[in-house]
Image (cartoon, rainbow, N blue to C red):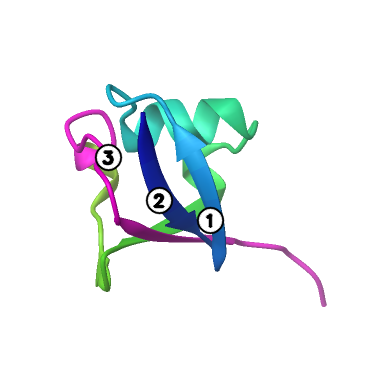
């Protein structure tokens, strides 16, 4: 298990969770979000490659259309 911070809230996840797995868990579409991983924007192509570990800080922002 790993303790991470997701959008300012502490959560516990499986140790083998990737960013992509986290997005699936929360039903977020990769095309409509941006992910900040420990203070840096993570390119979408790395979502499946980046595995979460203790004390990681993740911020996920959803794009919402309007006018």
Q: Which residue bears the numbered disc 2?
A: 4
Q: Is residue 30 magenta?
A: no
| Res. 61 image quadrant | bottom right
Q: Are marks 1 and 2 in contact (CB under 8 Å)?
A: yes
In whole angstroms, how far apart are the C-alphas of marks 1 and 2?
6 Å
- SS at circle 3: loop
Location of residue 34 with respect to 2 vertically, above or below: below
Closer to the camera, 37 or 28?
Answer: 37
Q: Is the magenta stretch mostly helix, strand or loop?
A: loop
- Between discs 1 and 2, the one toward the N terminus: 2
Counting the numbered discs, the total is 3
Classify 10 Å Cα crowding around label 2: few (below 14), some (14-19), many (20 and above): some
Q: At 26% across and 28% down in the image, what residue appears? A: 48
Q: Which residue bears the numbered disc 3?
A: 52
| Res. 46 image quadrant | top left
- Between discs 3 and 2, the one toward the N terminus: 2
Q: At 45% across and 58% down in the image, what residue appears? A: 5
Location of residue 50 with respect to 1 vertically, above or below: below
Instruction: Tell me residue 41's x, y (percent).
Output: 27, 66
Left or right relative to 13: residue 56? left
Q: Name the mark on residue 10.
A: 1
Point out the image quarter for the N terminus: top left
Residue range (magenta): 46-67
């Amino acid at each position: 298990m790993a303790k991470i911070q997701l959008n300012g809230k502490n959560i516990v996840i499986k140790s083998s969770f990737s960013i992509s797995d986290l997005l699936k868990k929360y039903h977020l579409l990769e095309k409509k979000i941006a992910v900040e991983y420990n203070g840096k924007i993570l390119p979408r192509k790395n979502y499946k490659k980046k595995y979460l570990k203790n004390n990681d800080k993740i911020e996920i922002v959803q794009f919402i259309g309007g006018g």
